[in-house]
Image (cartoon, rainbow, N blue to C red):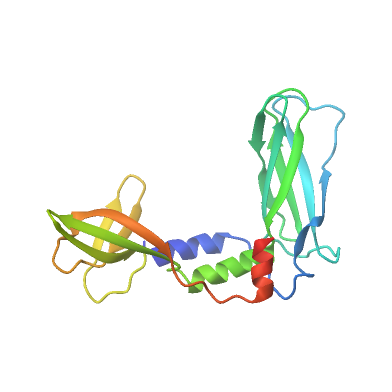
Amino acid sequence: MSVDDIMRSILDDLPKAGNFSSIESSSSGQHSVVNLEQPRAQYCVGDTLSVLVNVKDYRGNPKAHGGDFILARIHSPKLQASASGQVTDLLNGSYRVSFHLFWPGDVLVSVILMHSSEAVGILRRISAHNYDKIIYTGVFYRGKKKEQSRCGVRLKSDKPLCEYRKKEDAEYYACIPPKTLPCSTLRTMRSRNGPIPNMTKDEHFLLSR
């Protein structure tokens, strides 16, 4: 399976992100509402606690689609314990978050809108069109001789690449062959940020929130 196939399969499994039109119509954590589902007077260790997150935009209007990036956890400051919640996108602007209760006593619920669905859409667009926004440079050594070459997981080259695979976890990366040294002399890797992709002022603002 190629890198393109892997990236395509990952994106296909993700909910469709919202199209960004304005800040006001984007998902707002401040205006969204979290309610306890089917509240009970008492919960026991091992039970499941569920909350329903209804996402709204900056105007206070309910969202009609999913795709928001939400992180949730329960925690106990007294016990210094915490556990992540499982977020289920209902694809209609609402999300169900389920928590397994691991310890007795009081728990606090924390739900954070990390990125609105509109911000997720912007990030996907940037990833699709700026896959090489991080530039990797491999440094090859043999004795006192040193050469450098471009590396990454998706490279354009007319020559055969130096390919490196890790069978244990199927990791893969490659380098354009250095001028004279063999592929086996790769010793270190450096990285730097590539050109910043074009984004509007509102898109920058949305991602910085």
Above or below: residue 148 compared with residue 41: below
Q: Residue at x 28, y 53 (%)?
A: 188
Q: How many marks?
A: 0
Q: Is residue 157 left or right of residue 109?
A: left
- The picture quadrant where one finds residue 102 is top right
Quadrant the N terminus occupies: bottom left
Q: Is residue 131 visible?
A: yes
Q: Is residue 19 visible?
A: no
Q: Nearer the viewer, residue 38 or 192?
A: 192
Q: Nearer the viewer, residue 70 or 91?
A: 70
Q: Position of residue 185 (x, y in %)?
A: 18, 55
Q: Is residue 168 left or right of residue 98?
A: left
Q: Position of residue 36 (x, y in %)?
A: 82, 41
Q: Residue at x 68, y 68 (%)?
A: 205
Q: Position of residue 86 (x, y in %)?
A: 65, 44
Quadrant the C terminus occupies: bottom right
Q: Residue at x 21, y 58 (%)?
A: 140
Q: Is residue 56 left or right of residue 201?
A: right
